[in-house]
Amino acid sequence: MAIHPPVVVSKPSKSGGRRVHIDSQIMGMARSLKDLEEFLRRAGLDPDTLDIESTELIEWRGGGPDVWPEPPR
């Protein structure tokens, strides 16, 4: 049985953000790492103690922590 990370950052959406799930609950749409860090804080996690780029706690889909597309104009 596979163990899934409790934080999933979905692939970039056409609207420019990435949906964030924590423990299967939708936290919202992140448009930057700052947004993701706030969602982590709200879930009781400390982003200052996590290496967001390489922690196994976060599953990145459709690109890593450097992929934050601009919203369409």
Image: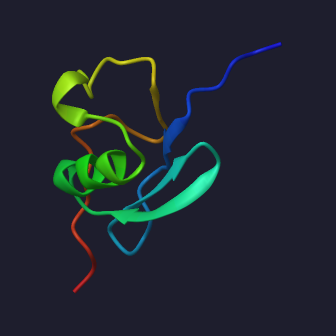
Q: Residue furthest right?
A: 1
Q: How is the image coloured?
A: rainbow
Left or right of 53 on screen, residue 6 = right
Q: Residue furthest top?
A: 1
- Residue 42 in the image, given as x and y percentages of width and height: 36, 54
Quadrant of the drawing holding the N terminus: top right
Left or right of 20 on screen, residue 32 = left
Q: In front here: 13 or 3?
A: 3
Q: Residue furthest bottom?
A: 73
Q: Residue at x 75, y 15 (%)?
A: 2
Q: Is residue 59 above or below residue 28?
A: above
- Residue 53 in the image, given as x and y percentages of width and height: 26, 25
Q: Residue at x 33, y 34 (%)?
A: 64
- Residue 8 in the image, given as x and y percentages of width and height: 51, 41
Left or right of 7 on screen, residue 54 = left
Image quarter of residue 38: bottom left
Q: In front here: 39 or 60?
A: 39
Q: Residue at x 16, y 31 (%)?
A: 48
Quadrant of the drawing holding the C terminus: bottom left
Q: Is residue 49 above or below residue 60?
A: above
Q: Residue at x 45, y 24 (%)?
A: 57
